Image (tube, rainbow, N blue to C red):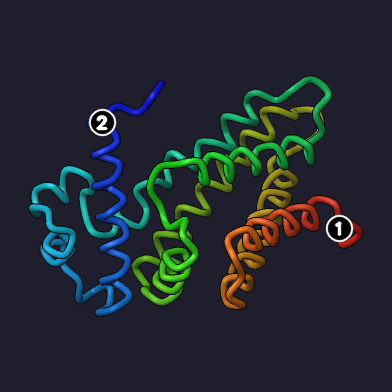
Amino acid sequence: MDESRRERKKRQTRQLLVETALRLFDEQGYEQTTVAQIASAADVATKTFFNYFPSKEDVLFAESTAYQAIPIEVIADRREGESVSELLTRAYQKSIADYRAGGVGPRDREFMQIYVRLVSSVPSLQAKALHQAFETQKDVAAALVAAYPDELDLISASAVVGALAGATQAASLVCLEQGCSEDELWEAMRRALDIALNGLGA
C-alpha cells in the first residue's frame, strides 16, 4: 500500500529525531545529552519525542525487535531441499534488503559510524547491544534446530549462528574504520557471510 501523508510525516519525524539524537550524542556525549535537548534541536515538543521513543536509549535500539524477527521468519519458511547455508544466506539477504528499503535507523554511513562509536564506547549501550545480540543468536539457533531437527542440535546451530554473527560484525567494523562506502560495507558483510559458511575458499 502507498504510504499515507500522515504515515510519511510520522516516519520523517522519527528519522529526524534519530539523526538529531545521534549528532548530539556524538558532539556532546551520550550521558550529557538530554531528551529535552534532542527535542529542542529537532524543533519538536519533548512530549512528541516520547510519542516515538520511551527513552533516549531507545533511539538507538528502537528497531532492533523488528529486524531481529526477520531471520526467524525466513527460517520458519524454509523451502523444501534448502540447505542450512542456503537458508542462512537467504535470511541474511532478506534482513539487509528490508533494512535498506526503509524505516528508521543509522543507514547513512556517517550515522552508522556514530552509532558504532557510541555502542563501542558507552558501557550501558555496549551492554544492551551485546545482550540483544546474544538473545537474537539464541533465538535464531533455536529456529534452525526446529527447521532441521534431524541435522542440527542446539550446540551445532549456536556455533554456526555465532560464527556468522562474529564474521559479519568484525568485517563491518573494519570496513567502517577504513572509511568504506555504504555499498562496500554491505559487500564486506556478504563476503564475511560466505567465509563463515563456506571457508576462505568462498
Q: Are marks 2 and 1 in contact (CB under 8 Å)?
A: no
Relative to 137, does residue 169 appear above or below in the rendering? below
From the top left corner, tell me how far across and down residue 63 is, in percent.
Answer: 39, 46
Q: Label 1 is placed on what type of residue?
A: Gly
Q: Is residue 8 left or right of residue 182?
A: left
Relative to 158, does residue 201 appear above or below in the rendering? below
From the top left corner, tell me how far across and down residue 11 is, in percent.
Answer: 30, 41
- In terms of depth relative to the viewer, which is nearer, 149 or 166? 166
Quarter of the image holding residue 189?
bottom right
- Looking at the rendered structure, the secondary structure element under dot 1 is loop
Q: Earlier in the sequence, mark 2 or mark 1?
A: 2
Residue indicated by mark 1: 199
> In the picture, which quadrant includes the N terminus?
top left
From the top left corner, tell me how far across and down residue 154 is, in percent.
Answer: 68, 41
Q: Is residue 114 left or right of residue 156?
A: left
Q: Label 2 is placed on what type of residue?
A: Arg
Q: Is residue 36 left or right of residue 1?
A: left
Residue indicated by mark 2: 5
- Looking at the rendered structure, the secondary structure element under dot 2 is helix
